[in-house]
Amino acid sequence: MTSLWKISCLTFRNRLIEEFRYPLQFILNTVSFITIIILLSLGSSVIIKGTSLETGTGALFMAFLAGAGFQAPTKVLAQSKLRLQEFYLRPLNSLQYLFAVSLGYAIETIITLSTFMLIIILILRQDLELPLRLLIIGFPVYMYMFGMGLALAGFRLIYQKIQTLSQFVWFVVFGAAIGASPVLLTKLSTWSVFASGLLYIRSGTANVYPIIIGALASILIGAIVFRFCEKIMLRRGLIGLD
């Protein structure tokens, strides 16, 4: 457990070093990202009547967080500069390493987005409750999508080229953040942690137990699918493929 936490902390530290190594690029990326999110949230306020700028921005930040969680396992696999052999030479088993690195990504992403949300709220002189909501709901939503991402990473071990599916999920989560009504989110929240997260951002109401159970179930199912695909990959000798 200590090794897992150390890897997560090192991943978080390395992400901060990467971001602050080039301060001008970091500032430009940050300003561009926030500007695009605000513009999209303005469009969301037109689609969903009564949605404020800060609420729409928080929902889009949640969508970005969900997409990052879904993409994290595949991203870790793709970071091996050689082939998959490099990934399997690490001291931890594959699932432990994927979880540890993705947890480091989660810490960095949640803190960053909550800070951005706080800056926007302070500029608009609104209540600080929204950044707190994002900080609270961010981790279970990330882990819920991480579980789905584990299943995708497992399929990648066998089929390799499946980037289109990842892009499709990005479109879905951003589309839901922009245009999904509170009524639809309420109906979906009983089985979708992401929908529950969006509902919590928009209205402040959340089903706590379904969120926790949904996140844990997603991780469990994702881990099972990943292990199953991993065994198929090793049995077929696909580990040397890109």
Image (spheres, grey):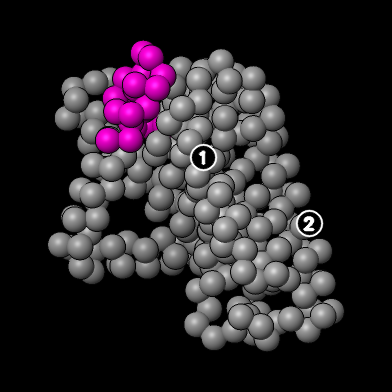
**Side of 55 where 4 appears, left or right:** right
User: Badge 2: few (under 14), some or many (20 or more) residues near its Cα, within 10 Å?
Assistant: some
Q: Residue at x 52, y 53 (%)?
A: 167
Given contact means CB atoms under 8 Å apart, are the residues at marks 2 and 1 in contact? Answer: no
Indicate the position of residue 37 as horizontal and vertical percent values.
Answer: 31, 39
Q: Residue at x 29, y 25 (%)?
A: 53
**Side of 116 where 70 appears, left or right:** right
Residue 143 versus residue 60 in the image, above or below: below
Q: Quadrant of residue 210?
A: top right
Q: Can you see residue 90?
A: no
Q: Can you see residue 233?
A: yes
In terms of depth relative to the viewer, which is nearer, 72 or 156?
156
In terms of depth relative to the viewer, which is nearer, 83 or 18?
83
Q: Quadrant of residue 184?
A: top right
Q: Which residue is mark 1?
A: 173
Q: Secondary structure at mark 1?
A: helix
Which numbered disc flags the more N-terminal residue, 2 or 1? 1
Q: Which residues are magenta?
A: 39-59
User: Badge 1: few (under 14), some or many (20 or more) residues near its Cα, within 10 Å?
Assistant: many
Q: Secondary structure at mark 2?
A: helix
